[in-house]
Image (cartoon, helix red, strand yellow):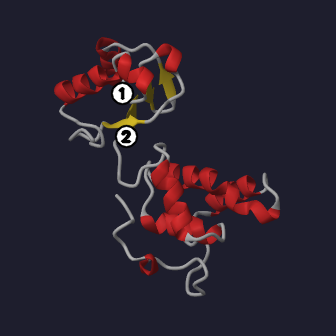
Amino acid sequence: MGFRDTPAGAAPSPADPQRDKGQLFTPEIRAAIDRAIAQYPPEWRQSAVMPALTLVQEHNGGWLSRELMDDVAAYLDMPAIAVYEVASFYSMYDLEPVGRHKVCVCNSVSCMLNGSEDLIGHVTDKYGVRPGETTPDGRFTLKEVECLGACRHAPAVLVGKTYHECLTPQALDRLIEDLE
C-alpha cells in the first residue's frame, strides 16, 4: 500500500479542528504513547512516532490503517505524511492486514549469499505464499525484509519477535510447523 498516488490533502490534517486527537485510541494506548513521549524533551514529542506506531499496530491486529496513522500524526502534532514515511520505510510496520504470525526473511547481501533466496523459494513452493502474501488460512505472512542485523550467522529469519540464524529450509519448516 502506498501513498504516493493519493493527493496530500486527501487525509485529515492534524491541525483540523474537526479531528479529535487520538480518537481511535483506547485510554490504555494513549497512556502508553504518553509514556513514550515522556522519554523525549517536550519539543521533540514527534520522536515517539516509532513506539506509537508499534503500540497502535499491535493493538490493531498487526497492521496500520491510514486512519490509525492519521491519528498517530494528530496525537504527536506532526504532519501525516511524516508518519506515512516512517511506516512505509521500516519493514516492522505493515500497511495491510497480516496473518497471525509474520515470517520475515532477510534479503541483505550476506543472507542472500548464504541461502535466503533458497528459503524464500522453499516457503513459496511448500506453502504457496510469496513475499508480501498471507497463507489462505491466515496462519502466517511471508515478508522479505532488509537486514536483520545477523550477517555473521546468515541467513537470518525473524518469526514473530524471535530471531533465528543459520537456517536451512528444513529448520525453517520446523519453525513454521510450530506456529499455531
Asked where in the image residue 22 lies, by quadrant, the reply is bottom right
110 to 101, vertically: above or below: above
Q: Give the residue displayed 39% in from the left and 15% down from the top.
A: 167
In which quadrant will I find the N terminus?
bottom left
Position of 59 with respect to 39 (left or right) is: left
Residue situated in front as seen by the camera: 106 or 51: 106
Residue 38 x %, y %? 79, 56
The secondary structure type at the circle numbered 2 is loop
Q: Give the residue displayed 23% in from the left and 22% down from the top.
A: 122
The secondary structure type at the circle numbered 1 is loop
61 to 6, vertically: above or below: above
Tag of residue 140? none
Q: Give the residue displayed 61% in from the left and 81% down from the top.
A: 15
Q: Is residue 101 visible?
A: yes
Marks 2,1: beta carbons within 8 A: yes
- Residue located farthest toward the bottom when viewing the structure as drawn: 17
Residue 52 x %, y %? 61, 55
| Residue under label 2 | 100
State which tag comes first along the sequence, 2 or 1.
2
Q: Residues within 10 Å of mark 1 (few under 14, many from 20)?
A: few
Residue 113 x %, y %? 37, 18
Residue situated in front as seen by the camera: 34 or 88: 88
Position of 143 with respect to 79 (left or right) is: left
Position of 91 with respect to 97 (left or right) is: right
Three-letter code for the amino acid on which mark 2 is drawn: Arg
Three-letter code for the amino acid on which mark 1 is drawn: Leu
Residue 78 x %, y %? 63, 69
Asked where in the image residue 123 lies, by quadrant, the reply is top left
| Residue under label 1 | 179
**Spatial separation of the CA atoms under disc 2 and disc 1:** 9 Å
27 to 155, vertically: above or below: below
Q: Residues within 10 Å of mark 2 (few under 14, many from 20)?
A: some
